[in-house]
Image (cartoon, rainbow, N blue to C red):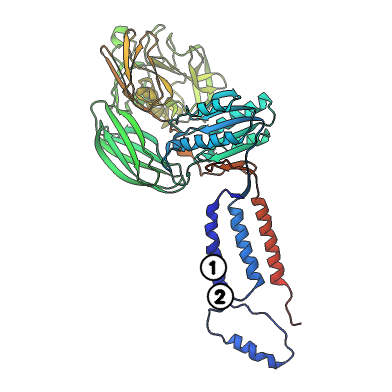
Amino acid sequence: MFFLRPGYFWFAPFAIAVLIALYMLKLRRDKVVVPSLLFWSRIVQDETANTPLQRLRSNLLFLIQCLLIAAIVIAAAQPSFLSTSQSSGMVYLIVDTGLTMETSDRGETRLQEAIQATERSLYSMHPRTIELISAGSQATIVTPLVHHTSRIMAALQTLRCDDGFPDIAGAINLATDLATTERNDNPTIELVTDGCWAARFPQALRGAAKAQVPVRVITVGNRHSGALMLSACNYAYTPQGNGLQVFASVHNAGTMPMNAVESLRLDGVLIDARSIRVNGNGNSTQVYQLPIVRARHKLEITLNPSGDLPVASRARLIVQPPPTRKVLLVGTGTEYLRAALLSDPTVRLWSAPQYPGKAASQGFDLIVFCNTAPASLPRGNYLFIHCTSNQSPVRSTHKVTRTAVESWERRHPAMRYVNAHGFVFPNSILGIPVNSATDLAKTVDGDLIVARRGIRHRQLFCGFSVNSGAFVVSVGFPIFVSNAVRWLTKDCIDVAIANYEAGKAIVLPNAPAKGVVQVTYPDRRVENVNANSVGVSVVCNEAGFYTASAANYHWTWAINPKYSDIASLGAHRVPGVGHEEVKAKPGKVNVVHRPVWRFAVLLVLGLLCLEWWVYYRPVGLK
């Protein structure tokens, strides 16, 4: 017999102690019928007892209630039968390689515990074929269709933890799809994890159950102790432009509260340190106020937990001085547009009724064309409003007198905090995206807003008119214009500024078109990358600061783990009913074949019925 949650046994002695106290403090008297007053002497003595503590007498009802408490506690502890795994079919072995598997509970990391538990499991099973899947930030097949256990053992030693939360649901879905498509006899999925992300894969477990593929879960480590990590980090300048605010959010992936010290360093110099406390499955956000910066700086936030689980987490940012955007507005009838552009304090605006030419426009970060644009333009950052040219991201435009937005892409940086649903756009021009452009707002008649992002330049097309319609006089219009200007000029809102997530190939901005670029990695490793006209691409799998250097070129950027989704995590749950959970023990592997807590629930119901019969049975003198 094995209990999935043995901690509930601590409730049993307290509950029984309370029950005994109630029986000793409160007398229970039975109604009796007597034939003579001679029997009243004993009853009067019982009535006149003035001490509340009485000797505990044998009572069938008390015994039944003790058994009832024991049955409830046993049911809550989830008893299960144990047996050794003897799988004889295809085994899809999934190993959790997420961030929390780097933590150490008993001197070794949870990943090392997982590898040891997996090895013990392999010794006890006799599968025909094993397929090893790594559940990092992306589910990956490590060794497909291996028939020898020794090869799996060797592959397990190559597993490394990923900088992010594990995609266990994707790994289970991948194994389920493989088991379904390959049509193997008796397929089994075996998952080894610390359970910190159990809330993310119940749906995948239900999918495996629907496909009739059993899932066995081996849990390692102590997921209840806690695991702190920085889930989000960003910075922004105050609206007045005289200060810098840094936001750091800490997430606790465990179920117990944890204390930690959060430190903020700028170019390696300690600026601030705070003590924080994060509840289980909770978040804590700290805001740091810094003075204005006049150059690029390396900002690093370090988290040092002071609990039993010493997990260190770091977040890095490249902080840049507040940008100043030189914007040229070309066109007439631009009163609303001009006011929207000037609402952004970082914009320095120049106006001209006609395009001044290539030579005169080279010093501007962005050129905005309103109602008019030349047919031919050089490459650059352009915002086209109610007009097009050869550099606009649309073609085959047509005019409509009235149209309404059908879909609005809110995830794009230019569309944040704005919703154009419900507005009618009169006198608009609509087009079809070209050259890998993306439609951001669609109407029933065509595309109203289209964006195109190149390696060095960006263009945005807006087909609505700024001389009519309710949208241009709404509060959302200046927000939309500010978002568009910041995205077109590559502001810190966009990740291309120098802050990225791990695992991506980064194209260095403004890199030289020829020659060799020397890239320095966080581990001090140096690599030479050949530059070309397409751009210099660097694969960044490690978290930390990177530097790229060449003749007359120097660029530093920061890579952070994939924490973007951690803040939305819910409470942890044990895998659903009908699936099997394994607790790894030294020396052997115990597999839960059938949970028996249902029988304990039936026992509780039976004892309740028995208690009802004893309590309400007729009592009288014989």
Image position of 136 (left or right of 545):
right
At which x and y percent is residue 159?
A: 48, 28
Q: Residue at x 38, y 22 (%)?
A: 496
Q: Nearer the viewer, residue 312 or 573?
A: 312
Q: Residue at x 60, y 38 (%)?
A: 216
Disc 1 secondary structure class: helix
Say if 39 sits above or below 612 in the image. Answer: below
Q: Nearer the viewer, residue 303 or 514?
A: 303
At which x and y percent is residue 302?
A: 32, 37
Residue sitting at the far right: 622
Q: Would residue 8 be seen by someone viewing this image from the given angle?
A: yes
Q: Nearer the viewer, residue 47 or 121?
A: 121
Amino acid type at image mark 1: Val
Q: Residue at x 54, y 63 (%)?
A: 13
Quadrant where the image shows the C terminus: bottom right
Determine contact: label 2, label 1, CB under 8 Å.
no
Disc 2 secondary structure class: helix
At which x and y percent is residue 532?
A: 37, 8
Q: Earlier in the sequence, mark 2 or mark 1?
A: 1
Say if 142 sits above or below 218 in the image. Answer: above
Q: Residues within 10 Å of mark 1 (few under 14, many from 20)?
A: few
Within the image, what quadrant is residue 35 found in? bottom right
Q: Residues within 10 Å of mark 2 (few under 14, many from 20)?
A: some
Q: Which of the labelled discs sits on residue 424, or is there none?
A: none
Residue to which mark 1 is pinned:
18
At which x and y percent is residue 198?
A: 53, 40
Q: Nearer the viewer, residue 226 or 145?
A: 145
Image position of 346 (left or right of 73):
left
Amino acid type at image mark 2: Met
Image position of 298 (left or right of 47):
left
Residue to which mark 2 is pinned:
24
Distance of label 2 from label 1 (alpha carbons): 10 Å
